[in-house]
Image (cartoon, rainbow, N blue to C red):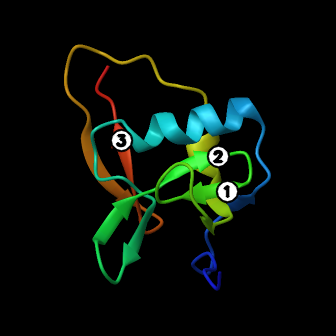
Amino acid sequence: MSDSPPPGVDVVFAPWTPEQVDALNFWQGLGAEPPMYHDDPVVGRLVLIATREGWVAHHPGPVVRIWAPRFMLAARPSLPSTPAVAERKEGFAVALLSP
């Protein structure tokens, strides 16, 4: 595994707590472009799944990444009735939820 975070991005490294795993997977499923993915030479782009040990492309499977952007550990926002809108932040997609 030779993947490293982009320069200047505030990251956290695995192992992650169960609460952190839950938060990371929550952000992955918000409906905006998933910020964490793995390019597989055979299958193509795969959305990653957070585990305590790091990100995997399928579960169970080998860990392909051990870092995540710190913003993904933020507390879950309350989801309004309006859809999320994607915006780029520090090279990653994040969801902006309207009030």
| Residue 74 visible in the shown view | no
Q: Which mark is residue 54?
A: 1
Disc 3 or disc 2, which is closer to the eye?
A: 2
The answer for how far apart the CA atoms under marks 3 and 1 are is 22 Å
- Pick the front one: 99 or 25: 25
> Which circle marks residue 51 in the picture?
2
| Residue linked to disc 3 | 95
Q: Name the kind of residue labelled 2 in the image.
A: Thr
Query: Could you tell me how many numbered marks the image carries?
Result: 3
Give how far across and how far down residue 81 sits, in percent: 22, 13
Q: Are marks 2 and 1 in contact (CB under 8 Å)?
A: yes
Q: Quadrant where the C terminus lies?
A: top left
For the residues labelled 3 and 2, the Cα–Cα distance comes to 22 Å
Q: In the image, what residue occupies the spot 73% across and 32% down?
A: 18
- Mark 3 or mark 1: name the one nearer the start of the chain: 1
Question: Tag 2 or tag 3, which sits nearer the N-term?
Answer: 2
What residue appears at the point 56 percent right and 45 percent down from the top-left corner? 72
Q: Residue at x 64, y 80 (%)?
A: 4
Q: CA distance from mark 2 to mark 1?
A: 5 Å
Asked whether the residues under the numbered discs 3 and 1 touch, taking CB atoms below 8 Å apart as contact, a structural biologist would say: no
Residue 99 shown left or right of residue 69 in the figure: left
Instruction: Determine the residue located farthest toward the left in the rendered image.
Output: 82
Mark 1 residue element: strand
Dot 2 alpha-carbon crowd within 10 angstroms: few under 14, some 14 to 19, many 20 or more: many
Work out which residue is located at the far front of the displayed protein and give it.
Answer: 60
Front of the two marks 3 and 1: 1
| Left or right for 14, reference 30 | right
